[in-house]
Image (cartoon, rainbow, N blue to C red):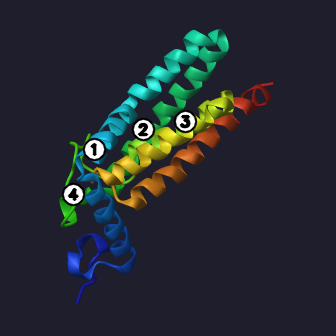
Amino acid sequence: MTAMSPSHLPEQVALPRHAFDRRMCIAANRWGARHAVGLFFGIISRLGDGVFWYSLMAALALIDGRRGLEAAAHMAATGLVALGLYRVLKRWTRRPRPFRTCPGVIAHVPPLDEFSFPSGHTLQAVGFTIVALAWYPLLAPLLLTFTALVAASRVILGLHYPSDVLAAMVVGSGLGALSLWLVHSAPQLFA
């Protein structure tokens, strides 16, 4: 008898850790089926595609001159690395989206790509937020709230499992912290 990997197990015999992830996904997705909830989180998700972040970068550059431009460039560089990293992770893990494999979950908006793990929206949002808050701590209420809403939207809309979002938060946090360390260490490294 050969062992099957968890991704090949039938829905009924999914491992307990996967069962909890699926139950949370189904519950959140059902909540998103309410028209107002789905509409709200659909808008949040769309803004999280990049519109919010690019607007923030442009505003920082316009409002705060050179410092704002440096902050925006720092965010953009972190975002480009995050984009590459998330694409590699998605191709490597190839986890199907919950609306494709989890009965009872529907996609309330179309996905941007085929795979689920990790949540690119969440990874980008966390990385951008960490960098932006290092430059402008007063933006914390806005950015932390928006980032939390983006993360929640991905599960509510049926596009990600909660574990996809949690993993993206960890990766995004690490990437944001590494980005800050590199920017602050660069002068000493090349001195």
Compute the Cα span from label 2 to label 3: 23 Å
Is the residue 12 above or below the residue 134 in the image? below
Q: Which residue is mark 2?
A: 84
Residue shown at 66% from the left, 35% from the top = 180
Q: Earlier in the sequence, mark 4 or mark 1?
A: 1
Q: Which residue is mark 3?
A: 143
Which dot, 2 or 1, sits closer to the camera?
A: 1
Compute the Cα span from label 3 to label 1: 23 Å
Query: Looking at this view, is 89 or 165 the one in front?
Result: 165
Query: Looking at this view, is 23 or 3 the one in front?
Result: 23
> Residue 104 at what x, y percent from top left?
19, 65
> Residue 118 at what x, y percent from top left?
40, 52
Query: Looking at this view, is 14 or 80 the one in front?
Result: 14
SS at badge 3 = helix
Amino acid on which the number 1 mark rests in the picture: Ala
Q: Which residue is mark 1?
A: 36
Is the residue 131 above or below the residue 165 in the image? above
Which dot, 2 or 3, sits closer to the camera?
A: 3
Amino acid on which the number 2 mark rests in the picture: Gly
Is the residue 107 above or below the residue 176 in the image? below
SS at badge 2 = helix
SS at badge 4 = helix
SS at badge 1 = helix
Amino acid on which the number 4 mark rests in the picture: Phe
